[in-house]
Amino acid sequence: MTRGKKYVEAAKLIDRSVQYDVNEAMGLVIKSAPAKFDETVEIHIKLGVDSRHADQQVRGAIVLPNGTGKTRRVLVFAKDAKADEAVAAGADFVGAADMVERITKENFFDYDVVVATPDMMGTVGRLGKVLGPKGLMPSPKAGTVTNDITNAIKEIKAGKIEYRLDKTNIIHCPIGKVSFGPEKLTENFEALIGAVIKAKPAAAKGQYIRSCVVASTMGPGVKVNTAKF
């Protein structure tokens, strides 16, 4: 894979054989972000679990102390009084069966998070094949199937993110923007890694966190030493 000149220059700042302390790693990510726009900083955590087994799933949600730096658009499946509550709480889109139709017929995906009241899950379930692969299916574990619509929307807008394993047992999550600076990124990193450690399945054996890398959208990866966690 050929890399651009800016990426190659940025990569020279990082020693690939070293696992850096969190704060130092964040400083390097910021220094090595080559783009002119405010890049997103992402964390990639490889876990010593097997996601094929139901008892080794790692999934949850957390409100990052400093948010993500991104305004997230929320779609809520609710009806009657709960639909009114969702509108009042600042949901970007609210609907029921009409929204299912819009998604299936118009390919409507102009939102980042989907929230549903429990009584709507029968309706939302019909969208499993469409929302599931995009990671948009509401789930009680992530706090996106709930009757407390106001709080759910408030938390998402404040920087709540969902973390979950992919097929290769890696969690990929945004933890902020380059403009946040090392301190805020470190706070977000520590909050997320703490949540992932708390979510360790009882069935997980051996080393839980195998590796951890942070990187900006266009920049090289920086390995983080997670031993102290």
Image: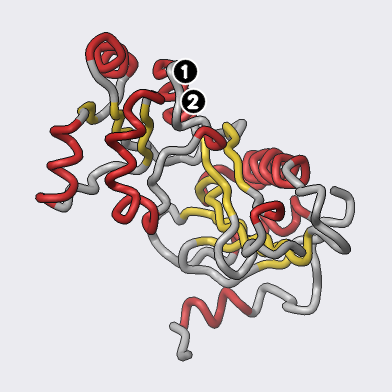
Q: Which residue is mark 1?
A: 151
Could you tell me which secondary element the residue under label 1 belongs to? helix
> Residue type at mark 1?
Asn
Name the spot of residue 39 as percent of width and height, x first: 45, 56
In the rendered image, the vertical position of residue 22 relative to residue 149, given as above or below? below
Q: Nearer the viewer, residue 140 or 31?
A: 140
Marks 2 & 1, CB-CB < 8 Å contact: yes
Residue 59 located left or right of residue 128: right
Name the spot of residue 143 as percent of width and height, x first: 51, 30
Residue 136 located left or right of residue 43: left
Residue drawn at (45%, 16%) of the image: 148
Dot 2 surroundings within 10 Å: few (below 14), some, or many (20 or more)? Answer: some
* Coloration mode: secondary structure
Residue drawn at (48%, 38%) of the image: 139
Residue drawn at (64%, 54%) of the image: 54
Name the spot of residue 220 as percent of width and height, x first: 58, 72
Q: Which residue is mark 2?
A: 155
Label 2 and label 1: CA atoms lie apart by: 6 Å
